[in-house]
Image: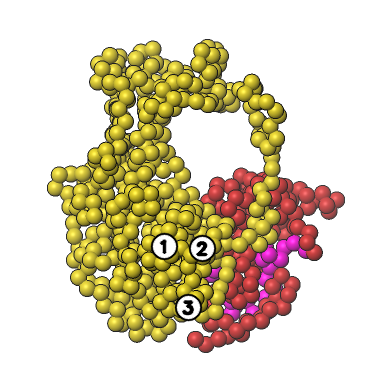
Amino acid sequence: MAKVPVQFSLNGEEKAEFVDSGSTLLKVLRDKMGDTSPKGGCLQGTCGSCSVVVDGELRLSCLTLAETCDGADIQTTAGLASDGVLHPLQRAFMDEFAAQCGFCTPGMIMAAKVLLDANPDPTREDVIEALSGNVCRCTGYEPIIRAVLTAARSNSQNAA
Amino acid sequence: MKLAKDYFADQRTEELKELGQGLQRSDVPGHVTGKTSYFADRTFPGMLCLRMVRSPHHHARIRSVDLSEAERHPGVHRILTHKDIPHNLYTILILIQVGPEDEHVLAEDKVRWKGEAVVAVLADSEWAANEAAAKVRIDYEVLPSVLDIDAALAPDAPIVNEHHGQNHYMYDSGPSRKVRYGDVEKGFAEADHILEQTYYSSPIEQAPMETTGCIVTPDGNDRFTCYTNTQAMFFTLDNTSIILQMPGHKLHMVGGTVGGGFGGKVDVTVEPIAILAAKLTGRPVSFIYSRYEEMQVSSPRAAEKIVLKDGVMNDGHIVARQVWGYTDAGAYSRHSPYGAQKGAAHYPGPYTIPNVWVDTWCVYTNRTPSSAMRGFGVTIADFALEVQMDKLARLIGMDPLEFRFINAYRDGDMKAHRQPTTGAALIECMQEASRVASWPVAEKYMQMSSYKGG
C-alpha cells in the first residue's frame, strides 16, 4: 500500500511518519507515535474515547485521516501535564473520583479542556453540553461534571 | 458521604480507619495522564489481524465452506476452520466438572445462533481481513429455530443443542435446581390472599467502553504471550490449555487494567483462537471485537422468565412462596447452569418465609449465549421479587416499606436453603432508607433490630 508522509506537532514535539494512505489519526498516534492516551472504543465516531485537540478544536481521531493533519498542532491527554505538574483538570478528576476503569478519561479530559479554554467559567449545563459526545459506561457522569466545574474554579482562583 | 456508625456499635472494638473516608483510587493518576496500560496499547511488527466470519442464521446446517476466493485476497495469510483446532468442543465450567462440553470454538456441522464463529481470517491489515472475510462462501441449510423460553420448552420444539439432548440443562437433581422448605401447599391453604404473577426480562448487554480482545506474540520456542482484557484469567488459561492441548507453562497470559467488564469479559472467546493463529502463522496476532461484535456477539445477561406465587396474611406475613425461574442460556451453557442454580438459593429474597418451593431451569434457545453480568442469576430475580413485594403490600393495603420490615430476615432465622442467617443488616438499612427518602414508617419498625429479640 502506498505510504504518505505526515508531519505535525504532537504535544509540542515535531513528529514525522510515513503512513498507509487512509490511516486514521487515532491509528497513527497509537501505533506509529506511541501515544496510546486516545482510545478506540467504537471506531465509528460515537463514543468520544479517541478525542484529541487539533488546532484548538476537539476532534474524533478515529474519524480523522492523519493526512488531513499535516502541519497541525495536536494535543492529547498524554501531553497535558507540564514538567510533571498536573493540569487542573487532571487534579480535579483525581480528587472528585471522576474515573473508574479510566478508558473514557483521556477523551473526557480533552473535551473538558476545549470547553475551559473557550469558556473559563462554564455553567453545569455548559459542561453537560461539552461532554455530550463522550460516553462513560461506569456511570461516572456526575463526578465528571463536578470535576470539570472544580477545575474551572481552581483555574479562576489561580488567575486571581 | 455519611457513615452510619451507631448501628452495631457494640460489635466494633476500634474506630474504623478506611470505611467512611474518601480515599483516592490507586490507579487514577495513570488514568488522568493517559499512562494506564490496556491490552491494546501495544503493537508489534508484522502483526496480523484476525476477523471472524459469523453465522447470519439463528440455526442452520453447514452444507459447505468455500475459502478459495478469500484465500486469494491480497494480504491474507491463513484462514482457520474447525479442522485446525486440536480440541474444538469445549465448555468453560468443565474446569469444575460442570459438563457436558457443548460448544465449538469454530462451528463444524451446524450453527446454533446468529453470530456463531465459523471461520477465522488472518490478514496483514484490518481492511484486508474485513474484505477477505466477505469473500468466504458458506452454504447453509436454514433450520427451524426457537427464540424464547416458552418456545424452547414446548413439546415439539426443535432441539437447539444435541450435546444436551433436550432444551434444558440436566442437573444431578434433574431438569431443575430445587429448594424445598416447609409445605407450600399448606401455606397457600392457610393464606388470606394468594398472588401469582409472571415476570419477563430481556437480555442486557454489558457494553464496556473497551471491547473484548487480545494480542498474542509467539515467543519463538513454542511458548506464547497473550495480552488480554479477560476478567477471568485462570478460566482463560485453563480452557485455552484444553482447547489447544498445550500445557499451561507454554501460555503466558498477561492481564492488566480492563476498560470495563461488568461480567462481559468472563467467557473464553478470543484467546484460544488468537493463540492458535499465532502458533500456525508464527506472527503476532490481534483479535479485537468491533463495537458491533461487542454489542451483538459478546454474551449478554440472560433473558429470564420468573413465575412467583405468594401466600400472604392480612397482618403482613408471607406464609408461602412458590417460584418457577427460567434462565435463557442461549445456544450454549457458558456460565448459565451456575447462574440458574444461584437463583434457586436466592428466590426467597432477604425475607423469612416458612414454606418455600423453588424450581430453576437453565433453558437453551437459538440466541446469543448469555453469561455473566453483575449478579447474574439474582439481579433479575430481585427485580421480580421486589415488584412482587409492592404488589403484595397493595393487595393487603399495607405500606410497602412496613410490609418489608414485617418479613425481613434477622439473625438466627433459617433460610429456605437451610443456611441460618447471620450478620443481617436489612432492618437497619431500611431504617436509614426511611430517613433518607423521607418515607416514614411506624415507630415500632424504627425500634426493630436485626438482632433476634431486639
* Viewer-side label of 1, 3: 1
What separation in Å lies between label 2 and label 1 (alpha carbons)? Answer: 10 Å
* Chain designation of label 1: B
In the rendered view, would you say A124 is above or below A33? above
* Mark 3: few/some/many CA within 10 Å (<14, 14-19, 20+): many
Q: Amino acid at mark 2?
A: Met
Q: Earlier in the sequence, mark 2 or mark 3?
A: 2
**In the image, which residues are magenta?**
A62-82
Which shade of the palette goes to chain B? yellow
In the rendered view, would you say B250 is above or below A66? above
Mark 1 and mark 2 in contact (Cβ < 8 Å)?
yes
On residue B240, the disc is: 1
Residue wearing tag 2? B253
Residue appearing at x 51%, y 80% in the figure:
B46
* Viewer-side label of 2, 3: 2
Residue B66 in the image: state x and y as whole percent. 26, 77
Q: In the rendered image, what is the letter of the chain coloured red? A: A
Quick check: do tags 1 and 3 share a chain?
A: yes
Image side of residue B23 versus residue B402, left or right: right
* Mark 2: few/some/many CA within 10 Å (<14, 14-19, 20+): many
Q: Quadrant of residue B83?
A: bottom left
Residue B8 in the image: state x and y as whole percent. 61, 22
On residue B283, the disc is: 3
In the rendered view, would you say B55 is above or below B198? below
Q: Amino acid at mark 1?
A: Thr
